[in-house]
Image (cartoon, grey):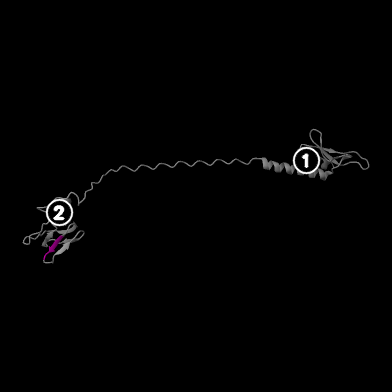
């Protein structure tokens, strides 16, 4: 019994209550029964008109029910851990400015600022390198004399960019050229420009391959 009393007393103390036990021995009395009072001495549980009314099991159930209630209330009211605020995204780095160009190409146009070429054809060298020369030729009604064919000691690739013209190589028939037409004249071949347009300039691009 002493161990039981100690157990109940400890449970009551944990709840802030005081265990009361009857020790009166009389027929029909409350001997061996218990009650609970608060810290101020007010009756809380197990008291009746004729004395104490609660046995050990009733005291346990009461105190355990109170403990469960306290635990539930504590869980509901205890704030959980605060969530750390989300870090603000780092600002996007500004793109690096493009590097300043170190070289500025010179752009020219083969079909602009054309010479008139009314009397003679106009020849302009565009590029000279060992073994190669590129020139622009502008014609306007000129032709190669029949008794003075052109002959050269290197291969030539030529394209007509604008206008119209006729060409004959060796004893071939004349071929008519329009914009975009091109051909190769081999070294040593006799060739003639048989005619060029008179109403507009004819612009040639010739690549001379020497070696």
The 10 Å Cα crowd at callout 1, few under 14, some 14 to 19, many 20 or more, is some
Relative to 76, say whether 164 is above or below: below
Which residue reaches farthest left?
147
Which residue reaches farthest top?
40
Q: In this view, does 106 lie to the left or right of 165?
A: right
For residue 181, which quarter of the picture? Answer: bottom left
- Give the CA distance from mark 1 to mark 2: 118 Å
> In percent of the image, x 70 and y 43: which residue is there?
72
**Horizontal and vertical percent for residue 63?**
78, 42
**Element class at badge 1:** helix
Residue behind mark 2: 138
> In percent of the image, x 76 and y 42: which residue is there?
66
Span shown in magenta? 165-170
In front of the other: 160 or 74: 160
**Horizontal and vertical percent for residue 188?**
11, 61
Whether tag 1 and tag 2 are in contact, CB under 8 A, the answer is no
In front of the other: 63 or 146: 146
């Amino acid at each position: 019994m002493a161990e039981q009393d100690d157990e109940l007393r400890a449970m009551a103390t944990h709840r802030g209550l005081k265990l009361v036990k009857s020790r009166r021995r009389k027929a029909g009395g409350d001997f061996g029964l218990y009650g609970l009072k608060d810290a101020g001495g007010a009756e809380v549980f197990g008291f009746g008109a004729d004395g104490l009314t609660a046995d050990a099991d009733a005291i346990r159930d009461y105190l355990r029910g109170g403990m469960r209630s306290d635990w539930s209330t504590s869980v509901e009211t205890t704030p959980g851990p605060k969530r750390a605020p989300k870090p603000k995204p780092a600002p996007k780095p500004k793109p690096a400015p493009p590097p300043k160009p170190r070289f500025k190409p010179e752009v020219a146009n083969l079909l602009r600022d054309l010479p008139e070429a009314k009397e003679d054809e106009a020849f302009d060298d565009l590029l000279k390198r060992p073994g190669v020369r590129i020139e622009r030729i502008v014609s306007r009604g000129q032709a190669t004399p029949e008794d003075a064919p052109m002959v050269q000691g290197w291969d030539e690739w030529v394209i007509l960019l604008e206008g119209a013209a006729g060409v004959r190589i060796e004893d071939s028939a004349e071929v008519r050229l329009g914009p975009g037409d091109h051909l190769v004249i081999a070294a040593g071949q006799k060739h003639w420009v048989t005619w060029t347009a008179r109403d507009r300039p004819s612009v040639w691009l010739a690549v001379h391959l020497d070696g």
